[in-house]
Image (cartoon, helix red, strand yellow):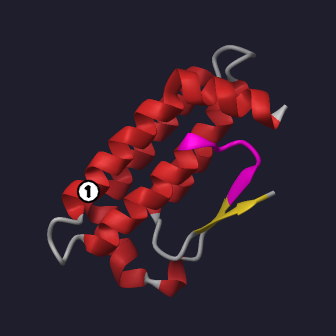
Amino acid sequence: MKLIGNILWLVFSGLESALIWCFIGLILCITIVGIPFGRQCFKLAHLTLWPFGRKAAIHFIKHPVFNIIWLIIAGIELFVIYMMVGLIWCVTVLGIPFGLQCFKFAKLSLVPFGASVEKK
C-alpha cells in the first residue's frame, strides 16, 4: 500500500512540491546566512517525494533560535497552506491518506530544525 500511495503522491503533487522546495533551498544556499535554512528545505523536499511509510519527529529544543526565525519568516504561512491543502484532500474518502500526509508536512514546516524523518 505504501508503494502505491507514494507513486500516486508523486504523480499528483509530490514531484512539483519537491521541485519547489529544492528551488527555494538553492536560492537560500546562495548566501552563507541562508545555508541552514536551505538545508531544511532540502529535508522537506526529500520527504515530499516519498512520504508514505515515513514519520517526522519534531525536536524544537535542539535549535530554538533557528526554529523561531523560521517560524516568523515562513513557518506559519507554510503551516496554513499545508493545513488547507490537507483539508481539501480529506473532503473525499480516497483523498484522506493524502490529506494526512499534508498534515505531516504542516507539522514539519512549523519547526524543521532538529526534526528527523524516519521510516516507520
Residue drawn at (52%, 76%) of the image = 114
Residue 6 pos. (x, y %): 68, 34
Residue 69 colored magenta? no
Q: Is residue 51 above or below residue 14?
A: below
Q: Which residue is mark 1?
A: 26
Residue at the limit of the structure toward the left, as seen here: 31
Within the image, what quadrant is residue 42 found in? bottom left
Residue drawn at (54%, 21%) of the image = 12
Q: Amino acid at mark 1?
A: Leu
On the question of residue 77 being in view, the answer is: no
Q: Is residue 91 above or below residue 30?
A: above
Residue 89 pos. (x, y %): 59, 23
Q: Residues within 10 Å of mark 1 (few under 14, many from 20)?
A: some
| Side of 16 where 59 appears, left or right | right
Query: Range of the magenta residues?
Result: 49-55
SS at badge 1: helix
Looking at the figure, which quarter contains the N terminus?
top right
Q: Report how many numbered discs are placed on residues in the image.
A: 1
Residue drawn at (77%, 27%) of the image = 4
